[in-house]
Image (spheres, helix red, strand yellow):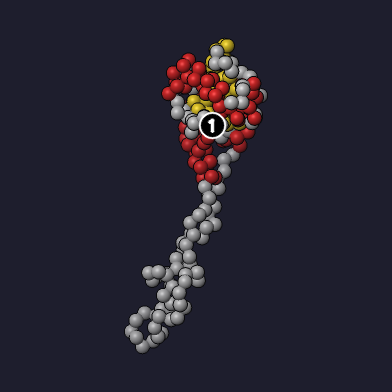
Amino acid sequence: MTADLYNIEGKKTGTINLPKSLFEAKINDKLLAQAIRVAQSNLRSAHAKAKHRGEVAGTTKKMYAQKGTGNARHSTAKAPQFVGGGSAHGPRGNQNYKLKLTKSMKIAALKTIYSKFAKNSAIIAIEKLSAITPKTKSAFALIDKLEKQNEQLSKSKKIGLVISKPTPSIKRAFSNIPGINLLSLSSLNPYNLSCQNFLIFTKKSINKLSK
């Protein structure tokens, strides 16, 4: 499988071979859904916290006498059974939402998402992108030229720009463009890839992926 290759002037220079083991792998939607759920859960942190009876403000005076009233025995109004009382088994702010995937499952999930993009022809590559002028205007011009040549790219609202490693010129050029998300190879995961409609790889990043 191949993808169209462009230069930083937006001109098509040929095609690039996509690694078959990564971009033509067996698609496992259930595993991909599981990987996304694990990633989302790991981004979650515990915020909910309920007060127990010892933390509720108010008097600790006994509600009424232990005996002689004919009523049930109670301590203070801060007991969980009363309105305004403490929570019996409420959240304490220390919930653990961390989940894990095995290394082989992570790799298989990444192969699935790569293959889905390749199958939908939602991948192109750019060579020598680090040589781009570090100006938002230059990046806008490049994206505009690419969109005129690729209808699917022009319809995509979220575009992932996959680079081999963070580069100052690329970061300065693309970071202020709405809908463009910079992704380095070290940070790729099924969740952030699944949030994109289209992927633009640098030629260098594809070569590193194949290795």
Which residue is painted at 41% across and 85% down in the image?
66
Residue 155, image x, y percentages? 43, 23
Out of 45 and 143, give the one closest to the viewer.
143
Which residue is painted at 37% across and 69% down in the image?
83
On the question of residue 112 being in view, the answer is no
On the question of residue 11 being in view, the answer is yes
10 relative to 104, above or below: above
Q: Residue furthest bottom?
A: 68
Q: Is residue 130 left or right of residue 99?
A: right
For label 1, the SS is: loop
Quadrant of the frame with the N terminus: top right
Out of 182 and 82, give the one closest to the viewer.
182
Residue 198, image x, y percentages? 49, 25
Out of 76 and 38, give the one closest to the viewer.
76
Which residue is painted at 49% across and 30% down in the image?
179
Residue 82, image x, y percentages? 38, 71
Amino acid, disc 1: Asn
What residue is shown with label 1?
Answer: 176
Q: Is residue 77 left or right of residue 8?
A: left
